[in-house]
Amino acid sequence: MKVLKISLIASMVCSTLLGANAFASSHREAPNITRFPTLDSTDFYAFNSYEAGREDYVTLIANYIPLQDAYGGPNYYAMDPAAVYSIHIDNDGDAVEDLTFQFNFTNELANNNQGIALTVGPAGNQRSVSVPLKNIGGITAADQSAANFSESYQLTLVKGPQNSGSATVLSNTAGGMFHKPLDYIGNKSFGDSSAYASYAGQFIYEFNLDGCASPGKVFVGQRKDPFVVNLGKTFDLVNYVPVEGDSTPGAGDQGGFPGGITQSADNDDLMDKNVTAISIEVPKTCLTTQGNGTIGAWTTASLPQARILNPNAKVGKTEVNGGALTQVSRLGNPLVNELVIGLKDKDTFSTSQPKDDTQFADYVTHPSLPELLNILFKDAVNQTLGTNIETLAPTNFPRNDLVTAFLTGFAGVNQLETVTPSEMLRLNTGIPAKPRDMQSAFGVAGDDLAGFPNGRRPGDDVVDIALRVVMGRLCYPIPVNGTDTDLGLCTSDDASVGTVPFTDGAPVDATMMMDHFPYLATPLSGSK
């Protein structure tokens, strides 16, 4: 009876939370951003670098342009040259950015924007005709002359608020512009995965920071999407039992919940998708110029307020943009705008600033989804089981466990010196990074203080973590340095299903990534 109860409740939890596109991280998470795919931030990471010899650095990765099919030619996935892509850092806890790294892109065809042309036709009737493709031959690390398209970008550091602070254009230590590699068109164009990796590696640059003793690193380019999720079966009315079916994940012994889903890469519906990553690595001391060594971070993308389309569009002249810079996307913690914010306020959240997040407080202190679950399914559960369950949702109000996870951080772990309730990733730069092979995909809940929600690493399984936290996992003790610790945020009586091992069965861990900057794996080829 108890096992059946857990199964039914778990299924309904997942169907409610996942059935509204909740677990595509931040892929197409709000109605308006679906109209701006090049500005859609899909995932954001902030972590202490775990590459050997880089322990004094922090890596920040902002992924954009969701659900990229590797074969998505002929134009593939360029960034918007009218947009400003930003990574923000708050280091004193007032929920206002103290540092912002801005990226502005320029797209250009070969031959001064005229493109590569071929001479076509017989003698006496020849024409020079522009080719329709982004490359006309093979491209290697040593020879890129066959490329018909290029992207470059300007990297700017703003100290103080983004709209009023002091801006400095950062320089490439090798001189020249910063460039973005072509997307992985296919193996006839690039050879194979290792050849593409060698080619893309040339686009990792060092940049100088005034007042910083060591240079930072930057890379912008296509990567394999690091996020994993079981989307298809979830949207099919949760066509699986979303509780771990093995005694431990990956054991393969069917020793967990009977019929429960087990971990398999086949459950990852993003396994064939790429993404565009904006990655920077900065010395910790250059980010923590004030405060207690913990930073808050988030990413945004903005456009000029007005866009007038050119009725006679030409390359580089498709529209005129003007007016104040206007934010259209925002991402800090994963899943917040999907799982917590109500549909009517999703676009508002996308355009808001962390300092104004008190307007969304009710979504955290009194979340609607667990209550909706209770309204929709409590009677059916009681009738089926012959029980009298009072409520399926956690009963601690306000939900201080969620306030801590999303808005304030955990004291002694990732809380800034000044506590201003606001939604952002919080990273304690003083907690040493763990090598890739020693990381727990469950972060802090897996006895790994270097992981989510202390920042976020690419190998942290935020889907399973979020499922469990929303349903009350923090109401039970969690391991801290090997010792089960009561966080004092709520009690086990507040969360009847708080220890259920909810999972979508799509595993992720750090070994799926590289162990060095820019960390995310080489993108998938558009053609074998």
Image (cartoon, helix red, strand yellow):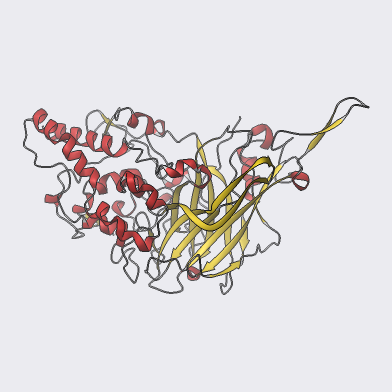
Furthest toward the right, the residue is 124
**Hey, which quadrant is residue 91 in on the image?**
bottom left
**Hey, which quadrant is residue 6 in on the image?**
top left
Q: Position of residue 178 (x, y in %)?
A: 65, 56
At 37% from the left and 34% from the top, the residue drawn is 230
Q: What is the count of numbered marks?
A: 0
Q: Is residue 376 left or right of residue 223?
A: left
Furthest toward the top, the residue is 122
Q: Position of residue 304 (x, y in %)?
A: 55, 54
Q: Position of residue 281 (x, y in %)?
A: 53, 60
* Image quadrant occupied by the C terminus: top right
Q: Position of residue 84 (x, y in %)?
A: 55, 55
**Hey, which quadrant is residue 188 in on the image?**
top right
> Is residue 439 visible in the rendered structure shown here?
no
Depth order, front residue of 65/448: 65
> Is residue 324 visible in the rendered structure shown here?
yes
Depth order, front residue of 270/24: 24
At 37% from the left and 55% from the top, the residue drawn is 451
